[in-house]
Amino acid sequence: MKISKTKFVLLFVVGAVVFMISSTLLLGQPAESLFGTGSFAGILLSPVKMILMGPLLPFIHFLRQDPDTPPPFFLAGFVFYWALLALSIHYLISKFKVRHA
């Protein structure tokens, strides 16, 4: 099954947003809290949250210096990083399929 880059990136970004919102609601902690609550769900979700949020922590801390930072700046940073991550994953998967096909 082939999937276009655009569709893959869109699904990845939507999935990342849904994951972050649902894990934040499930754990009851802010999204930048990477290590969970010590619960079983927190232990399972922590590695994924580290990949999705870890490199963005300096960006979050920089934007939080100004107390009136509009939320679209956070969302734009997340979407940009997640799109780059999705493109790199799509590239690696396509290279892996070509070698082993």
Image: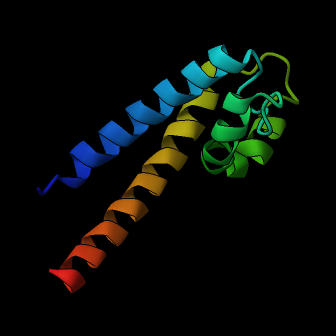
Reply above or below: 87 against 92: above
Give the left or right position of residue 18, taking residue 31 as reference. Answer: left
Quarter of the figure with the C terminus: bottom left
Residue 66, image quadrant = top right
Tell me which residue sits at (66%, 48%) in the image. 47
Q: Position of residue 17 (x, y in %)?
A: 49, 28
Reply above or below: 62 against 94: above
Q: Position of residue 71 (x, y in %)?
A: 64, 19
Tell me which residue sits at (41%, 33%) in the image. 15
Q: Position of residue 39 (x, y in %)?
A: 77, 27
Tell me which residue sits at (11%, 56%) in the image. 1
Name the residue furthest left: 1
Give the left or right position of residue 83, taking residue 96 as reference. Answer: right
Give the left or right position of residue 65, taking residue 39 as reference. Answer: right
Q: Position of residue 85 (x, y in %)?
A: 48, 55
Tell me which residue sits at (33%, 46%) in the image. 9
Q: Nearer the viewer, residue 71 or 37?
A: 37
Name the residue furthest bottom: 99
Q: Nearer the viewer, residue 55 or 29?
A: 29
The reply to whether residue 34 is in sight is yes
